Amino acid sequence: MCGIVAYLGNKPARSLLIEGLKRLEYRGYDSAGIAIMNGKLHVVRAVGRVGTLEEKLDQLAARGEYDGTLGMCHTRWATHGGVTEVNAHPHRDDRHGIAVVHNGIIENYSALKTYLKEKGHAFSSETDTEVLAVLIGELYEGDLEAAVQAALREVDGAYAITVICEKEPDTLVVARKGSPLIVGIGADEYVVASDAAAIISHTTHAFALDDYNVVKLWRAAGADGQMVYEFRTSTIHNVPVTPKIEQLELDLEQIELGGYQHFMLKEIFEQPQSLRNCMSGRIDAKDGKVTLGGLANFARDLTRAKKVILTAQGTALHAAMIGRYLMEDLAKVQAQTEYASEFRYRNPIIEDGTVVIAVSQSGETADTLAALHEAKDRGALALGVVNVVGSSIARQTDAGVYLRVGPEIGVASTKAFLGQVSVLTLITLFMARRRMMSADHCADLLREMEQIPAKIERILEQAPRIKRVTEKYIDRENWLFLGRGYNFPTALEGALKLKEISYIHAEGMPAAEMKHGPIALINEGMPAVFIANKGRQYEKVLSNIHEVRARGGHVIAIATEGDEHIADHVQDVLYVPEISEPLSPMLTVVPLQIMAYYAALARGHDVDKPRNLAKSVTVE
Ligand code: G6P
């Protein structure tokens, strides 16, 4: 949600910033802007994608104004104010040539704006960020770092910001609370960005800011005339902080398309390998044992847990819902799922023995992070199931398990979902074995888990057929996704995938619920996707299929290989290999991902950058 890249170094900043910004475009893409220091502050902004900004910049570049070695840029996902050039970042103050780019929301911006207007300041945009820029200007007395610290002491809300000032042309000040920001340290250069993807082509040496940290990065001529690059980290109250510098574990290949047309397709096809990585070293199928290093110190708490609350948003919530079924069914522990956004504002009951698991690909989702804080404040053991290493949720939980599925760039989550379900299955089995599951039962399930990647490969081979089936229904504006038990959340996920990227209206629900209202929607030719794999409720699902058929609906069934019988009852069947029911969502979801992808493609949409969405939602 909004991407930031800033650079201070010995190379021309412009192309480097634009290249970094393109890597962060998944975070938001309604407008973009750049500020370069070259004697004076030069700012260019454009509505639309980073490519539009680049074209605009190329036309201006001949004038040489954009040749500086200090600069910053931003790709926006609008919160305050419409998608216009005036509202695009960077924003400037009205006095000192200060520019700010910002990811987050300044919640008390309205009160601050009134105060600043009374002081005689003028504003040109509707944004909260301009208020922050003007506030920093109001407090500026010749020291940018001090002005930023002072301004942030007045601010409520979330921010990752980078700030430059015409009066200090060799200084970059950056700060964070709630929204991620990483400082990459190269030889005579610093690259600051919202995420490591914009840093790794320059350096792998980096540190993540903690909340309320402010970093001043600057250069000055040393005794020998050579430029010396330095930085210092402090809090907004100017208390020095020692940052933890680490090696970024990210491979450039992982964040490139590698021949695929879209990241979403690449990530769907990566699933067998990413699942292998996720399970590697964690499964001992021979002895029926699961090893999760992150949870080793909390095994007793999990064994004695009285209740597990899984909390998340979006796709991660659907994975959490599957986790709930797994925990109740296999670990015999009371489990519930909660939208993080609702959980935090209710008055949740956290008794002794409650474990809260926050599930999140990015580890930065503001609602999920806030739910986690609520759970911790109320005394729960807080665990994370997170993909991004070192992210806010990963750092603020008591313990956790990483997905290890590699970076996910397509806005519509696919391989992270599978990783989340896989890790939640492993956590369930980790608990179940310590509670009442036999080693043999666990061993059987683990052996089956090991076969899942190969089974997914078989589903992927069917992609051309899934495409053809999808294209048959591509002109229909309303779809239903129906499933029962473990595959009710899969139905929700299938519907979410389709609506996210193809903008087709789709509803997911328990198959039995359909007759309590949604059945009224069914008319001639309406597509209904049934997850009808073999399991406890197979016969009941078949009855629901007949209810749809009787009203003219067209049924696409996701069925188990070998189930020829179902083909007599539906228009189209997509088969998945046989598997035990608790593990089945890891297979049944794959054809639904592929359907959504080809539906969006057939409708001519930008699959990786669906309208209005952003990959990482760092505002509430
Ligand atoms: C956004 C994304 C979804 C994602 C959700 C939760 O809405 O568009 O794809 O599922 O956030 O994200 P998280 O990073 O917490 O898994």
Image: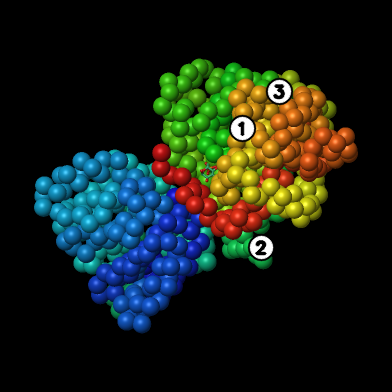
Q: Which residue is mark 3?
A: 329
Residue 253 in the image: above or below residue 274: below
Q: Position of residue 504 (x, y in %)?
A: 58, 45
Q: How would you rate the neighbour count of disc 2 (Cα within 10 Å): few for under 14, some for 14-19, many for 20 or more?
A: few
Q: Amino acid at mark 1?
A: Leu
Number of other residues with Cα within 10 Å of mark 3, as a class: few under 14, some 14 to 19, many 20 or more: some
> Which residue appears at 51% of the width and 31% of the height?
339
Mark 1 → mark 3, Cα distance in angstroms: 33 Å
Find disc 1 in the rendering and name its residue.
521
**Mark identifier at residue 260:** 2
Query: Which residue occupies 48% across, 18% down?
Result: 349
For the point 66% across and 50% down, the residue is: 474
Give the mark toward the camera: 2 or 1: 1
Q: Report whether 9 appears left or right of 417.
A: left
Is residue 335 left or right of 119 when viewed as pictured?
right
Q: Are marks 1 and 3 in contact (CB under 8 Å)?
A: no
Cα–Cα span, label 2 and label 3: 39 Å
**Corner quadrant of residue 478:** top right
- Considering only order in the chain, which callout, 3 or 1, is on the residue closer to the N terminus? 3
Which amino acid is tagged 3?
Asp
- Of residues 481 and 273, the one nearer the viewer is 481
Of 60 and 331, nearer the camera is: 60
Of badges 1 and 3, nearer the viewer stands 1
Residue lying farthest bottom? 62
Distance, label 2 to label 1, CA atoms, is 37 Å
